[in-house]
Amino acid sequence: MEKTTYWHRNFILILIGNALLFMVYNMQVPVLPLYGKKLGLTPGQIGIFVGAIMFAALVTRLFVPWFSSRFNKKFLLMAGIILYLLASVGYPLLSSFGLLVLLRLFNGLGHGITTTYFATAAADELPQQKIGEGMGYFGIGTMVTASLAPLLALAVVQHYGFSAFFLTCIGVLAVSWFAIFGISKAAPVNPKAAKSALIFDRQFLPQSGLVFILGVLMSGVMTFTPIYAQQLHLTGISGFFFIAAIAGVVIRPIVGPLFDRQGPRLILLVNTVLLTLGMVLIAMLNHNWMLLVAGVFYGVADGAIYPTLQAWLFKVTTLENRDTATGMFLNSYDLGMGLGAVILGVVVEVVGYQGMFLVLAAVALGYIGLALWGSRSTKIV
């Protein structure tokens, strides 16, 4: 008999474990550059050190079919969290640039495993008719901890130092590990995964292509909005990200049930329009209130589009290819984030910050058509 509810032990523990792991990731994002600077690394070295985790995660996800055919998800999640924890133990013990990069790559192995299997483990616990709603709540945990993480991390470093910060990371990861250890049963090994799933599968191109472009758009906002606001002598950038986080948390429980009833088209259409308006507002910035309104548009769009694409992906996958589809989806988003920052940096040098955000607004406008075309044959069952 198909499950009709998802608020049970396994789903709750997976949600908690995922939220805490992402909390550590978002704690380390603002602190590791400061730690690298303290060790005397150059800005270029700091960029390589911090960014190495994404490169390793991208490569790791290429082996998802192999992992899925040999190990169950509970084991993989516990192993991935251990890799994360060991990296946090190692950071304060090393000072060599080369060794720090190797450790960050090791961290990326754990990041690639956990980000893939947390999402699919959560989806496995959801009734098919409530997958949008369930993944929406699953994402709320990530958004809440991601919003609080930088504030907590910087406060710990400021008052207690880097050693206390890394101990905090270790403690949070230990709780995440025990949450997964407490799962009552593990999904069985999927021996068909390596045979039936491909690293690249064209049936997942609509979702993966759209999330790649979303990654480019998001990277532009997250990377260059603070610098642009500073250039304009605006002081509301912290408010921008705070209100965006609140808007994202509020919208997720709304779009999940809407997706389950109507599919992705309406959600993608409305929220891509909001994203376009947000980009235009940022481009035309001249007052803090515009930054805050743009934060609402950006937060609602970000909180709606990503989980909608993810839920849509899970709707069209089978249990045999779900892990690989998720790896392809996450790699597309991370690749968009990484390439977006590089490409848009060049765009800024050519047309300036205002011009770059107008380019993003044009891309977002085109995204509407791509989203409608990609979801044209989607059926909700």
Image (cartoon, rainbow, N blue to C red):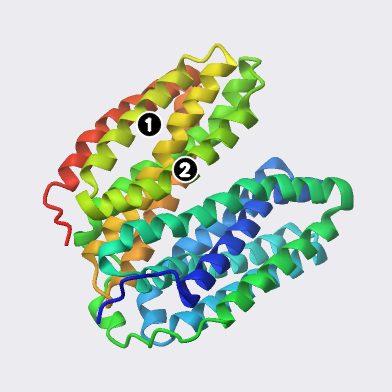
Residue 131 drawn at (x, y percent): 32, 62
Residue 153 drawn at (x, y percent): 74, 50
Residue 178 drawn at (x, y percent): 63, 78
Residue extending furthest left? 377
Q: Label 2, label 1: how many angstroms apart (C-alpha)?
A: 16 Å
Residue 104's quadrant in the figure?
A: bottom right
The disc label shown at residue 249, or none: none
Q: Which residue is drawn at 35% across and 44% down?
A: 305
Sooner in the amino-acid sequence: mark 2 or mark 1? 2
Residue 176's quadrant in the figure?
A: bottom right
Read off the residue under disc 1.
Answer: 275
* Disc 2, SS: helix
Q: Vertically, is 62 above or below 345?
A: below
Q: Kindly identify the amino acid type of the residue bearing the numbered disc 1.
A: Leu
Residue extending furthest right? 160
Read off the residue under disc 2.
Answer: 250
Q: In this view, does 79 lie to the left or right of 334?
A: right
